[in-house]
Image (cartoon, rainbow, N blue to C red):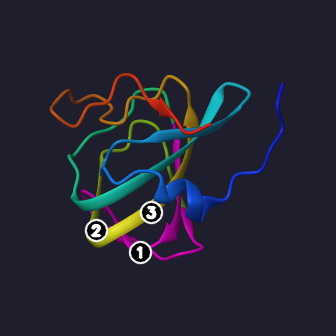
Amino acid sequence: MSIDKVNLAQAFARFDDAWSPKVAGDVNEFQVKLVKLRGEFVWHHHEREDELFLVVKGRLRMQFRDRTVVVEPGELIVVPHGVEHCPATDGECHVLLLEPKSTLNTGNVANERTVEKLERLD
């Protein structure tokens, strides 16, 4: 087993595609994922998985059906399972996700943004 640190700026510089999470590491049955967000995603929810979104760069608007929460760099939001949400940005936003390995990025929705096999950065 190799133990090494992850430099977030360098890791985010390794890819450009938006809405396609990359695995930066594993924590028990969870994965640490890095993703670049641009524009608006799709409305979806996750039946069993909670999601943690930590904004590293940019501004995330986490839209819920009854309100929108703005998440700035250095802030995080946890979206509980079963809660419909739609991440959105005005520009590019870099986000660290912590979620179970079973989490599909589009949750209960399958479309062109669904990523079934995640690329690893390590």
Alpha carbons under labels 3 and 1: distance apart: 6 Å
The answer to whether residue 106 is above or below residue 4 is above
Magenta stretch bounds? 50-76
Q: Which comes sooner in the sequence, label 3 or label 1?
A: 1
Residue type (three-letter) at the residue carrying disc 3: His
42 left or right of 32 in image: left
Residue behind mark 1: 58
Which badge, 3 or 2, comes first in the chain's sequence? Answer: 2
Q: Residue at x 39, y 36 (%)?
A: 82
In this rendering, would 70 be left or right of 32? left
Q: Which residue does the numbered mark 2 point to in the structure image?
A: 89
Marks 3,1: beta carbons within 8 A: yes
Asked which secondary structure carries label 2, the reply is strand
Query: SS at mark 1?
Result: loop
First in sequence, mark 1 or 2: give its number.
1
**Residue type at the position of mark 2:** Thr
Cβ atoms at labels 1 and 2 below 8 Å apart: yes
Does residue 26 lie above or below 97 as drawn? above
Residue at disc 3, secondary structure: strand
- Name the foreground residue: 121 vs 66: 121
What is the CA distance from the residue labelled 1 to the residue labelled 2? 8 Å
- Residue 14 is covered by the magenta coloring: no
Which residue is depicted at the point 46% across and 29% down?
Answer: 103
Disc 2 crowd rating (10 Å Cα; few below 14, some 14-19, many 20+) is some
Q: Main secondary structure of the magenta part?
A: strand
Tell me, for residue 94, which label it has, or none: 3
Q: Dot 1, crowdedness within 10 Å: few (<14), some or many (≥20)?
A: some
- Residue type, numbered disc 1: Gly
